Image (tube, rainbow, N blue to C red):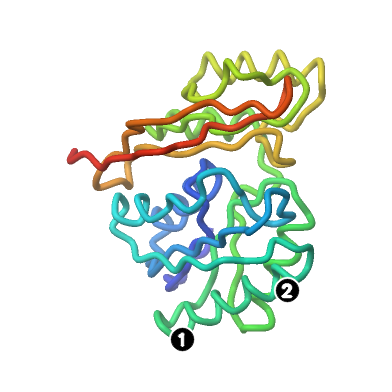
Amino acid sequence: MHKKTMKVAALYSGGKDSTFALYWALRAGHDAKCLITLIPERNDSYMFQVPNVELTTYHSEALGIPLLQAKTSGVKEKELEDLKKVISAAKEKYGIDGVVAGALASEYQKSRVEKICRNLCLECFAPYWHYDVEKYLKEIIAAGFKAVITSVSAEGLGVELLGRELDLEMVERLKAISSRTMFHLGFEGGEAETMVLDGPIFRKRIEIVEAEKVMESRNSGFLRIRKLRLVEK
């Protein structure tokens, strides 16, 4: 753990990994100056989470941390220029020294964020890189984060998981499926996505008021969230 206190920006999708990486940064004593969200204009971004990512405006308010949100083409490699522009803007506006990412196992994502940070003379933190995945999921739950599954895209994962909370029972269920189909238990390959609704760093909790399940095939679909609200804690 880095002892030097830094001003950091958190790459943020609203999901479990970016939220837990932010949690790590705050517990390490770093000053989270802003969240950075890139919204892909296509459904198959190599770098960024897609379903409901535009809703991080709610997370920004719930966390009490400013948000820099920008659109990206979602085209492979070109989207990196979009990311670099926003990180550069964060450096200029907030004087950040580093960037925090929720990368678990994707060498593609981690290496590219690190390269951008090097070019901008920023440190890059990926605190849970190659961390034991089952232990990681259980730590998220034990810390008090409430995350729900908002998309599925892997064999064995169906419509019944959409909107379900990622709790200990769900971890066991996912482990059983993963042992058969070999998907990444942390969803690092896009096998599923999550949205965090509450946790120890949230000043307000988020409630899903209206949503619908949209299945594109037997093992691929997402929760289209139509309405959220913030609730005082």
* In the rendered image, the vertical position of residue 203 relative to residue 226, given as above or below: below
Q: Would you say 109 lies left or right of 160 here?
A: right
Q: Residue at x 73, y 73 (%)?
A: 115
Q: Secondary structure at mark 2?
A: helix
Question: Given the current orientation, which residue lies at the most extreme bottom position?
Answer: 92
Instruction: Report if residue 100 is visible in the image.
Output: yes
Q: Earlier in the sequence, mark 1 or mark 2?
A: 1
Q: Residue at x 71, y 31 (%)?
A: 153
* In the rendered image, the vertical position of residue 65 relative to residue 203, given as above or below: below
Question: Where residue 209 sits: x, y (%)?
Answer: 32, 31
Q: Would you say 136 lies left or right of 68 here?
A: right
- Quadrant including the C terminus: top left
Q: Would you say 148 lies left or right of 204 here?
A: right
Instruction: Report if residue 199 is visible in the image.
Output: no
Task: Using a 10 Å C-alpha cutoff, classify the residue at mark 1 as few (fewer than 14 neighbours), some (14 to 19) or many (20 or more).
Answer: few
The amino acid type found where label 1 is placed reads Glu
Q: Nearer the viewer, residue 44 or 32?
A: 44
Disc 1 vs disc 2: which is toward the camera?
1
The amino acid type found where label 2 is placed reads Lys
* In the rendered image, the vertical position of residue 32 relative to residue 161, given as above or below: below
| Residue 26 falls in image quadrant | bottom left
Task: Using a 10 Å C-alpha cutoff, classify the residue at mark 2 as few (fewer than 14 neighbours), some (14 to 19) or many (20 or more).
Answer: some
Q: Nearer the viewer, residue 81 or 24?
A: 81
Q: Which residue is mark 1?
A: 92
Question: Where residue 67 sits: x, y (%)?
Answer: 40, 65
Question: Where residue 213 sits: x, y (%)?
Answer: 54, 26
Residue 2's disc is: none
Q: Secondary structure at mark 1?
A: helix
Q: Which residue is mark 2?
A: 115
